[in-house]
Amino acid sequence: MTITVCAITGSRADYGLLSGLLRKIRESSRLTLQLLVTGSHLSSMHGKTYREIESDGHIIDKKVDLDLSGDTSLDVTLATSECLRRVGVALEELKPDVVLVLGDRYEVFASTVAAMLGGYPIAHLHGGESTEGAIDEAMRHSITKMAHLHFVAAKSYAERVIQLGENPARVFNVGSTGIDNIHDTKWLSKDELESYLGFRFRQRNLLATFHPVTLEKNSGRAQVCELLKALEQFEDVGVVFTQPNADTETSGIKEAIVDYVASRDNSTFFESLGNSHYLSCLRVVDGVIGNSSSGFTEAPTMKKGTINIGDRQKGRLAADSVINCLADRESIREAIEKMYSTQFQAELACVENPYGGPGATNRIVKILEEFSYDDLLKKHFFTNQP
């Protein structure tokens, strides 16, 4: 008897970490994969990235389309409501044995609520983490309390999940699947990347992604403009920008970046690079800049520096390759200079990634194959106090 696993992805952010795991589940003789795609994957504003999922060879069993044409708090609230309703209907049709979700975004939160109310066991990846500047913080911990199996990326995150009352027997420190993606990626050469991007790399280059800090009202455009003002001072540095997540204030950030790129030949902008192109870019550039989690989970493994701006990722476990700075042009400028310093570049070779090494996907698949799903829905609040 096989176990049917319904994996839900709502954005390029979670799909990038799930892609290799989906292949492993599909290859398993004891697991059957269902794939439900929703959120920005189906949005023309965000590049319709479901096509990348299909080009990777995955079969999409259900597409749950949401109206993501706006980026106000009300727009996100309505999209969350619609996601809850439509995913609930889809799960009723799919009837999986277990629902697999990753992360903390509102599409994942709504999908998890639908799974919980539908009576489906939930397996959650990347719980226990902290991002104090984003609304994702509350949703991540809420997902943890609704989930039944927890695949975390580090020991301290396992401890936090247990601190929330989860049974240690259901908490597994497997590491980050993003590291497996690095080892499994078919690399594009620099020439191939330049042809794809229509952009020629400079002697020095950065990969930039800046997301809204969703717990700070009306700060997105102002903060990304500080980043752009800082980058203006480094005309010899090539910059590849990727699009921000589908959050509140996304449009203002995107407009500022597009305007900046239009007047400079040392930068380019892409709505979505896709996993292999993104990682291949990361391999070519000197480091990442902005506030993306990839600067914490993937860049250290590739011995690249990370300039983390502002508070979106505040509280996240970080390697020595991460330079934190304020969201103002002078602080960002100083961080760029530090990253390019001879001493910092020399130290990168010795950086250890706190999210571990490869093997997370195999560990997760093995647990999903062998775990007993009897009476999984009933949870007791765990406490080690007498």
Image (tube, rainbow, N blue to C red):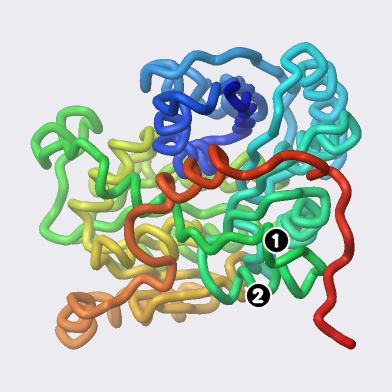
Q: Residue at x 57, y 41 (%)?
A: 368
Q: Residues within 10 Å of mark 1 (few under 14, many from 20)?
A: many
Q: Mark on residue 134?
A: 1
Q: Is residue 159 left or right of residue 204?
A: right
What residue type is disc 1 on? Ala
Q: Is residue 65 left or right of residue 303?
A: right
**Is the residue 45 above or below the residue 335 in the image?**
above
- Note whether residue 258 is visible: no
Q: Tell me where residue 219 appears, x and y as whole percent.
A: 68, 61
Towards the viewer: 289 or 96: 96
Q: Tell me where residue 324 appears, x and y as whole percent.
A: 47, 78
Q: Residues within 10 Å of mark 2 (few under 14, many from 20)?
A: some
Q: Quadrant of residue 66?
A: top right
Q: Tell me where residue 362 appears, x and y as whole percent.
A: 40, 45
Q: Mark 2 falls on what kind of element?
A: helix
Q: Quadrant of residue 376?
A: top right
Q: Residue at x 69, y 73 (%)?
A: 160
Q: Quadrant of residue 196?
A: top left
**Is the residue 366 above or below the residue 157 in the image?**
above
Task: Look at the image and tell me in which quarter the C terminus lies.
Answer: bottom right
- On the image, numbered disc 2 is attached to which residue? 159
Towards the viewer: 310 or 38: 38
- Note whether residue 155 is visible: yes
Q: Residue at x 82, y 17 (%)?
A: 92
Q: Mark on residue 200?
A: none
**Is the residue 46 above or below the residue 367 in the image?**
above
What residue type is disc 2 on? Glu
